[in-house]
Image (tube, grey):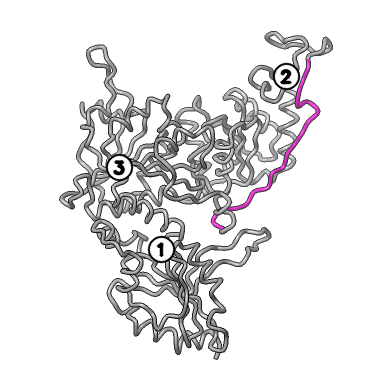
Amino acid sequence: MNEADTRAEHIDPALKAAGWGVVEGSRVLREYPITLGRIEGLGRRSKPLIADYVLVYRNHKLAVIEAKAWNEALTEGVAQAKQYAEKLSVRFTYATNGQGLYGIDRETGKEGEWPNYPSPDELWTLTFAKQDTWRDRFAAVPFEDKGGSHPSRYYQDIAVERVMDAIAAGKPRILLTLATGTGKTFIAFQIAWKLFHSRWNLSREPSRQPRILFLADRNILADQAYNAFSAFPEDALVRIAPDDIRKKGKVPKNGSLFFTIFQTFMSGPPKDGKPSPYFGAYPPNFFDFIVIDECHRGGANDESNWRDILEYFSPAVQLGLTATPKRKDNIDTYRYFGEPAYVYSLKDGINDGFLTPFKVKQISTTLDDYVYTPDDRVMEGTVEYGKRYSEADFNRIIEIKDREKKRVEIFMHAIDQREKTLVFCATQDHALAVRDLINQMKASADPNYCQRVTANDGELGEQHLRDFQDNEKIIPTVLTTSQKLSTGVDARNIRNIVLMRPINSMVEFKQIIGRGTRL
């Protein structure tokens, strides 16, 4: 009897007899895809991880079952069962050949033969021995998956559950660290969905729906989040903008989900000669839950004004979202929020096949440092005799146009010019010069082939970025920037990232690499 027969004739009936798929709220997920398999190139992937069975009850994955054929040893599937359970972060996992059942409790380390499959209620009680009213209320709210068309990934489920557990336990500050492109906004949406529909709020009584604030540091990120939350009722969503506040003479308070940027909250006309930021127009306990997007960029930095907002709304439970692991240059974030409730790294995302691997091609020229000689002509400014100008000085202190021209020429020959490319430059002026050089050398006949997107480019730059993000459009093909596009901007199918300045921060490097790791 092969594995398929064993499952159909012995395992499936035994699960049904235990109540799986029969008891309301219980489901059996067969051939559950955990990972996609690492991308290996040329259209190939490594082998994906697929669990034979995942047992779900009350919207929680509770156990994994690895099935083998009738004539194989009972414990043949134990190694796989443990691997899948660890990946899915479930406590119980089982191996079976249809004749018996071998169970492993990953929390206590106990393992051995079980007489039969536990029922959904028995497995729930074994997993959650301690009663928790809010955990049960959160569990009663299913994920919003748009009718099954947008299923969540395994690590997103874990991230949501970890946050819900922290909220149920009364933790005031929570941090999630997930690599760029792994769906932090999707996770924030699912958390808000559960809080909204379970009517959780700071009173800890389900008397009203919560007021949730989504804080970003750029309008494009706040707008992306606002659009991602479109499954909520329209009258629940509020986009806080300074023009609206000025027009109405007050901050908006009717709604459940509020979206804004730090800069809007920090602005506001002075009163009696003193600063009067708009966030002060809300009572400190107005918001029940606050999501701080890309929180490593200052939201929790001691020197930042943004910290004032977080401290003013200190009664709220605050969730920080970051893509960067703990390092020297984001230590304040970790000091404020504490250790992450869950970490999903760039390496995890690449190995699982949810992110694409990248190759690094380093290019050196004969002018990667420079000492002035009398043969050289100074076009403008003054040069320091005897000084060795290094990479960090180029395009900030010293500019050699022929050098930039050569560097652009090298990478333009190295890439397929039809593929989307981001070029990170030293300054906004450098990004302007590189844009012009690219357009002078391009094979394309389109005058808008390369555009600059920096703070100086205003609304026109934002339009170029929107066109670049649109998968239906191929122009602009290349964007040059200095800092603006290093984080948070969703653009798929970016093939090349060109660094024309030193990146001295691992945090920033991972953020920039993240622009190109989306599938």
Q: Earlier in the sequence, mark 2 or mark 1?
A: 1
Secondary structure at badge 1 equals loop
Residue that appears at 47% across and 46% down? 177
Q: Is residue 500 left or right of residue 213?
A: right
CB contact under 8 Å: marks 3 and 1:
no
Extreme residue in the left direction? 207
Q: Residue type at mark 2?
A: Tyr
Q: Position of residue 500 (x, y in %)?
A: 66, 31
Q: Residue type at mark 1?
A: Ser
| Numbered tag placed on residue 2 in the rendering | none
Q: Is residue 159 left or right of residue 415?
A: left
Q: Which residue is mark 1?
A: 149
Q: Position of residue 13 (x, y in %)?
A: 39, 86
The answer for how far apart the CA atoms under marks 3 and 2 are is 49 Å
The answer for how far apart the CA atoms under marks 2 and 1 are is 55 Å
Q: Residues within 10 Å of mark 1 (few under 14, many from 20)?
A: few
| Numbered tag placed on residue 317 in the rendering | 3
Q: The N terminus appears in which quarter of the rendering? A: bottom right
Q: Which residue is mark 2?
A: 389
